[in-house]
């Protein structure tokens, strides 16, 4: 029991940190942050999440032999370590770590996004390293790593499922990863700059977020054998995810149609309400990710 | 962008493969059964070959006991062991197995012995292909 609990906690926290780090890297690629101090702060946040994600992914992997044995002493069992090393979990871990290392490189202080506060480069300074490719590839590898193990990797239509999962997670990275930077912007940047960034994010999110649902429904269609599954823990946790997503759409719609226009119009208190709404979205996504970690660790759609 | 698309395709190819995800198909004794006398053997049969990593028996809140001194390293869709001497009471067989996709599955098999115990049994050999009922 204890190895299972520790494993799922490490897994859930690892999901949050990895998707957050990948999302911040994508945010910095997609949206120009006009204020250097805010850009540097967001970069540092992403860097810290990426480092935390690497640690948590390694802890989760290290606990696999213990999970296999049903006891923490299994960590030292060389035959179980070997079994873990030849499993899909090992492949997923390696791909995820590779993606996170690219993100750490992309968010490095010496890169373009690491330019210091108020620092404009002099004529003799070298061109800062541009980390766009590393950010894109790193974020993509993080999303793809989840297709290496579990039900999407084992099922009959694994190629389609793998593709759907990568789309699903890439958009989640984009959405989840943007929330903290947007909160940062509304707190630290001039309101006009924050409003511009929010509008740009909102336009892109309107196009991309429906793909989360489309990909999710596609995966459910292919994986779930019958409606009986909703009487089982796997199906019930899936319903928790669906409910979380529905609540997220309500908050996101409130932000788009009411709060961002209020911020643009300079309404008093709009920034604070927007921050709270974004924080609410963040908490909901964390709950959905925790439900996913539990669902995919312990249950199966075929149960 | 082309490089990104190529890497995306490559990473999906590398990370998805033909793997089997499996469940417990049958057991002996059957889960939830009440037996007049203690079973001579405890056996599990899975839908697909797995590597069993835990196979223990426990009575009530007592410490669990390993059913095999060493577990098979090869995958198999069956595992069985000679049952230890079991007195009347409720028992739980705890099992864990790793399927070929690396998924760790676990389960419990519960049964009750209402009557006397079977003769004392020797420690079972790993990988006995005895059929489950």
Image (cartoon, coloured by chain):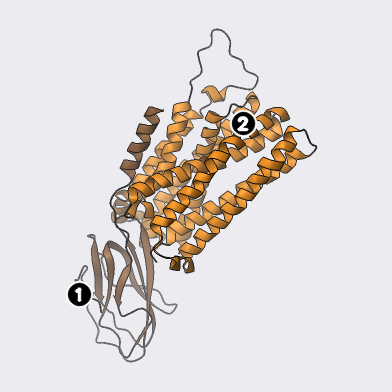
Residue A177 shows in this picture: no
Q: Colour of chain B?
A: brown
User: Which residue is the extreme one toward the right?
Assistant: A268
Pinpoint residue B11: horizontal percent, then vertical percent: 35, 39
Which residue is found at the position 44% from the left and 29% from the top? Answer: A134
Is A120 situated left or right of A134 in this image?
right
Q: Name which residue lies at 54% across and 35% down.
A: A24
Residue B74 as seen in the image, left or right of residue A28: left
Kindly state the secondary structure of the residue where label 1 is placed.
loop
User: Label 1 neighbourhood size at 10 Å, few (<14), some (14-19), many (20+)?
Assistant: some
Give the colour of chain A. Answer: orange
Residue A97 appears in the rendering: yes
Rendered location of residue B8, percent (x, y)? 38, 36
Name the mark on residue B10: none
Image-quadrant location for residue B40 = bottom left
Tag 2 residue:
A41
Q: Position of residue A105 (x, y in %)?
A: 46, 29
**The C terminus of chain A appears in which quarter of the rendering?**
bottom left
Indicate whether A68 appears above or below B92: above
Is A294 or B122 nearer to us in this picture? A294
Count the numbered circles shown: 2
The residue at the far top in this view is A123
How far apart marks 1 and 2 lie (CA) works out to 64 Å
Residue lying at the far left in this picture: please name it.
B129
Q: Which residue is mark 1?
A: B130
Residue B30: x and y, percent? 33, 79
Q: Secondary structure at mark 2?
A: helix
Which chain letter matches label 2? A
At 44% from the left and 40% from the top, the residue drawn is A142
Considering depth in this image, is A265 or A38 the residue closer to the camera?
A: A265
Up-down relation of residue A273 to residue B63 (above or below): above
Chain that bears disc 1: B
């Amino acid at each position: 029991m204890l190895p299972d609990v520790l494993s799922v906690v490490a897994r859930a926290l690892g999901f949050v940190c990895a998707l957050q780090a990948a999302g911040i890297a994508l945010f910095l690629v997609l949206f120009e942050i006009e204020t250097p101090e805010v850009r540097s702060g967001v970069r540092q946040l992403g860097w810290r999440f990426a480092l935390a994600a690497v640690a948590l992914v390694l802890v989760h992997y290290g606990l696999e032999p213990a999970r296999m044995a049903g006891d923490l002493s299994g960590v030292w069992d060389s035959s179980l370590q070997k079994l873990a090393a030849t499993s899909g979990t090992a492949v997923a871990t390696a791909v995820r770590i590779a993606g996170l290392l690219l993100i750490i490189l992309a968010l490095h202080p010496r890169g373009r996004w690491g330019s210091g506060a108020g620092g404009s480069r002099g004529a003799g300074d070298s061109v800062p390293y541009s980390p766009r490719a590393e950010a894109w590839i790193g974020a993509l590898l993080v999303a793809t790593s989840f297709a290496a193990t579990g039900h999407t990797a084992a099922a009959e239509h694994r190629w389609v499922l793998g593709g759907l999962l990568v789309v699903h997670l890439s958009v989640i990275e984009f959405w989840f990863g943007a929330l903290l930077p947007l909160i940062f912007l509304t707190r630290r940047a001039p309101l006009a700059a924050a409003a511009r960034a929010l509008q740009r994010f909102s336009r892109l999110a309107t196009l991309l977020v429906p793909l989360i649902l489309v990909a999710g429904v596609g995966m459910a269609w292919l994986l779930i054998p019958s409606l009986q599954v909703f009487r089982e823990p796997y199906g019930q946790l899936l319903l928790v995810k669906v409910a979380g997503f529905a609540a997220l759409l309500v908050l996101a719609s409130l932000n788009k149609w009411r709060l961002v226009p209020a911020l643009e119009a300079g309404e008093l208190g709009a920034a604070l309400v927007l921050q709270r709404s974004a924080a609410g979205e963040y908490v909901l996504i964390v709950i959905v990710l925790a439900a996913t970690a539990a669902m995919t660790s312990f249950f199966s759609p075929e149960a | 962008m082309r490089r990104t698309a190529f890497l995306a395709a490559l990473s999906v190819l590398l990370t998805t493969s033909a793997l089997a995800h499996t469940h417990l198909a049958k057991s002996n004794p059957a889960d939830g059964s009440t037996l007049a006398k203690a079973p001579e053997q405890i056996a599990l049969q899975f839908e697909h070959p797995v590597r069993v990593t835990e196979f223990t028996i426990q009575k009530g809140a007592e410490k669990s006991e390993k059913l095999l001194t060493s577990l098979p390293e090869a995958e198999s869709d069956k595992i069985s062991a000679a049952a230890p001497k079991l007195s009347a009471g409720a028992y739980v067989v705890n099992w864990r197995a790793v399927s070929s996709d690396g998924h760790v599955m676990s389960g419990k098999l519960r049964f009750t012995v209402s009557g006397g115990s079977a003769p004392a049994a020797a420690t079972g050999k790993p990988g006995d292909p005895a059929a489950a009922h």
